Amino acid sequence: MKRVWSWLLTLALFTAVLRCFAATSAATIYELVQCKKILAYSGSAHAYFYGCDGSTLVSARVLPDISVKTCRAPGVIRAVCHDESNAYALYEESRGRYGVLALRMDSGAVDTTALQFDGEIQAVSFAVSRGEVFLLMNDRGSSYVLGLRGGNATRYTAQSGAEQLFINGGEVYAQMYSGEIYRVGQGKLTFCLRLAAHSRLVNAGNGYVYSDGVLTGLNGSTLSCGTAFAVKTDSGVYTCGTEAMAVAAVGNRAAVLLTGYSCEYKTVVESSAAPQATSAVGDTGAQDAGDGSDGDIGVLTAGTTVSQLKKAFPTVTAVTDADGDEVTSGAVRTGYIALFQNGSRALSVSGDLNGSGTVNSADVRFLMEHFVKGSDISDCVMQAADLNRDGLLDNRDLVLLSRATA
């Protein structure tokens, strides 16, 4: 009898070890196969891959453990989102009649709520936070965010129309057509930063989003990654290539969903070989100026003004144009010179190739002519044109530049 109990105990321990290994090394998440598009959410304690197909919502918690939940909505799912604990689906029960489904990832319980509102909805994205549902609405050709809580409706309007909603760190953010990012909720819009227009954003860790090779903090700081996917972890940035479908992280662990729906796990070790830092100085003001050397500035975001640059980098004593005349106001242009006590450097503004201070179709033509004629360009223009920050100028940069000006 003792031998039997000993054998059973050994088997139980062995099974537990196998389960632990399966949960931390690799696993195939077959339920995600049915999803038309896979999205990722990285929170403070949990990470998820999720998506939908028709009326089915699928969410797979992949960190710190694996737990897959699915459910059916009482209508066609038009958009999905996720937060730290729940997956949500915006469904259309019949023409013009919408509701929200909440899938509780701890218990698998499902709640549905009918939505009451007037107006035309844009069902490209939606968000839920603190009991408030946020929708994209159309009104005579302009778009805005509508917040619904119980029987109350709040209209959130910015100068540029709203293009996309997303959740990060439990907060809801609205991306405007102009590229501005606002935090939405509690009756107000709060400006966070400005990105290139029509940037395709992906949740990339608590407080970070990823778009076209650049990891951007919602406080305005950026890291150039130059890869297909990137996520911010407590130990640094984890990057992966085109073989990945999505990536999420919690703590110093990253979960990578590969094309065969196999989820692999990586432990991110803090390293001094961090991606190149760049600056996205917006209306929020100063960023970390580092040690004050000219190498701290990196590539600036289009629209950064001279005053914002000086505030973010106090070691800049003056800014001049290419002719040496001092510039004290207005937007920084590619080719402007930042002066320091110990030297100077030419400035680069992402996408501004012709030195106009803006990003438009003229910059696209500039890059196309460079490819056709093979003309020489300066280092600062090269950096401004390298939109995916891989150190090369090729068609991928042209595609990103074209998207930014569309």
Image (cartoon, grey):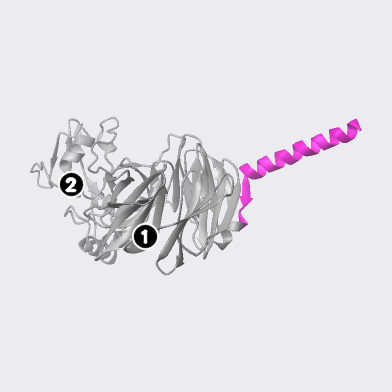
Does residue 176 sit above or below 311 in this rendering? below
**Main structural element of the magenta stretch: helix, strand or loop?**
helix
Residue lying furthest bottom:
95
Look at the image and tell me in which quarter the N terminus lies.
top right
Q: Position of residue 292 (x, y in %)?
A: 25, 31
Return the residue nearer the eye: 366 or 130.
Answer: 130
Magenta stretch holds residue 23? yes
Residue 319, given in percent of the width and then of the height, sits at: 14, 40
Amino acid marked by disc 1: Arg
Asked if one can make out residue 387 in the rendered structure from this viewpoint, the answer is: no
Please tell me whether residue 397 belongs to the stretch shown in magenta.
Answer: no
Per the rendered image, the range of residues in magenta is 1-30
**Spot occupied by residue 90 in the image (x, y as percentages of width and height):** 45, 58
Which residue is drawn at the image coordinates 32% and 62% (left, top)? 118
Left or right, 285 with reference to 233: left
Q: Amino acid at mark 2?
A: Val
Horizontal relation, residue 392 to residue 21: left or right: left
Image quarter hosting the C terminus: bottom left
Give whichever of 223, 9 is nearer the camera: 9
Point 28% across, 37% down: residue: 295
**Residue under pointer 1:** 396
Q: Secondary structure at mark 2?
A: loop
Residue corresponding to mark 2: 332
Whether pointer 1 and pointer 2 mark residues with C-beta atoms closer than 8 Å, the reply is: no
Q: CA distance from mark 1 to mark 2?
A: 25 Å
Q: Earlier in the sequence, mark 1 or mark 2?
A: 2
Front-most of 338 and 80? 80
User: From the viewer's perspective, is 262 left or right of 149?
Assistant: right
